[in-house]
Image: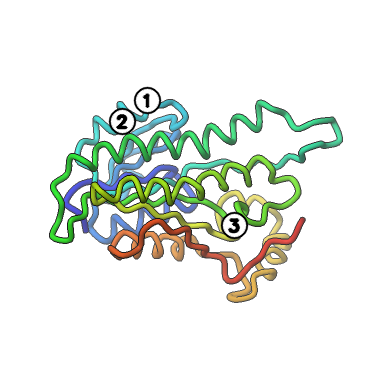
């Protein structure tokens, strides 16, 4: 698929895991970057785990240096705790807000910055491309629900970074795109009662179900291969528009 390694963050579970599985099946070399250390025997062939706290810029740079040649980055690491701006116990916990921003925004930024610098050293392919960056935003960036103020703010920031990054890195032949998924069947969703999962899935116009993580992975794979896709935030939501709550 690519000459060098594809870095996938948050690949221990959920959307990141689906991306890892699909890319590995396509024959890619995948560097799995996750806070959780994944045993080698739990990884598909061609994948190597690199435990890392993506909120730590120094730790991220050390891992990227260790990986070496990098053709693409897919950022899936993120958290989504729910809390209102003013809850029953008072104002939103500022430390919780800062944590969400640290993981979702700074974690994405650190990986983008370090990987882009590594990609700049690649020789361009026959289309002039040196690398691809795919980040994960969310429909919450556009229709954040009550209780999602921190999450919506973080995903809005991820979406907003896409175009300026694509414009800046265009001179180096590095593309940048973001995917904004709707409601997907991830471990966070699976922790809810089945009837709640079914109810949430039914709010999707079509198909009326929770998204399959492999659908997300398939779109990632397409973005990686489609040289014209650049500077775009792509909604993957079955025409869902989130209600207030």
Residue beneath label 3, please? 139
Residue 216: numbered disc: none
Rendered image quadrant of residue 82: top right
Using the image as rendered, state which of residue 53 and residue 94 is in the foreground: 94
Q: CA distance from mark 1 to mark 3?
A: 30 Å
Task: Answer with left or right where residue 231 lies relative to residue 130.
Answer: right
Residue beneath label 2, please? 63
- Residue 62, how many percent across, how many down? 30, 26
Mark 2 burial class by Cα count in 10 Å: few <14, some 14-19, many 20+: some
CB contact under 8 Å: marks 1 and 3:
no
Task: Please identify, in this view, whether the residue under mark 1 or under mark 3 is nearer the observer.
Answer: 3
- Residue 244, how many percent across, how many down? 76, 57
CB contact under 8 Å: marks 2 and 1:
yes
Residue 46 shows up from this direction:
no
Residue 59: numbered disc: 1
Q: CA distance from mark 2 to mark 1?
A: 6 Å
- Residue 187, how many percent across, how many down? 56, 50
């Amino acid at each position: 698929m690519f000459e060098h390694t594809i870095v996938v963050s948050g690949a221990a579970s959920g959307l990141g895991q689906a991306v890892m599985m699909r890319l590995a099946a396509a024959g890619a070399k995948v560097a799995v970057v996750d806070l959780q250390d994944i045993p080698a025997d739990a990884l598909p062939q061609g994948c190597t785990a690199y435990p890392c706290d993506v909120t730590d810029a120094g730790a991220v740079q050390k891992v990227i240096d260790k990986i070496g040649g990098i053709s693409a980055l897919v950022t899936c690491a993120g958290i989504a705790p729910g809390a209102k701006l003013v809850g029953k116990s008072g104002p939103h916990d500022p430390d919780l807000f800062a944590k969400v921003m640290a993981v979702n925004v700074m974690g994405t930024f650190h990986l983008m910055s370090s990987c882009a610098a590594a990609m700049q050293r690649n020789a361009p392919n026959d289309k002039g491309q040196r690398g691809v960056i795919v980040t994960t935003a969310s429909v919450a960036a556009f229709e954040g629900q009550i209780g999602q103020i921190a999450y919506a703010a973080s995903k809005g920031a991820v979406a907003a970074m896409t175009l300026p990054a694509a414009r800046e890195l265009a001179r180096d032949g590095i593309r940048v795109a973001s995917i904004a998924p709707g409601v997907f069947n991830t471990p966070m969703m699976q922790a809810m009662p089945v009837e709640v999962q079914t109810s949430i899935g039914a709010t999707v116009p079509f198909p009326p179900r929770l998204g399959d993580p492999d659908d997300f992975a398939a779109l990632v794979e397409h973005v990686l291969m489609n040289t014209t896709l650049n500077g775009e935030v792509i909604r993957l939501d079955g025409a869902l528009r989130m209600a207030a709550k």
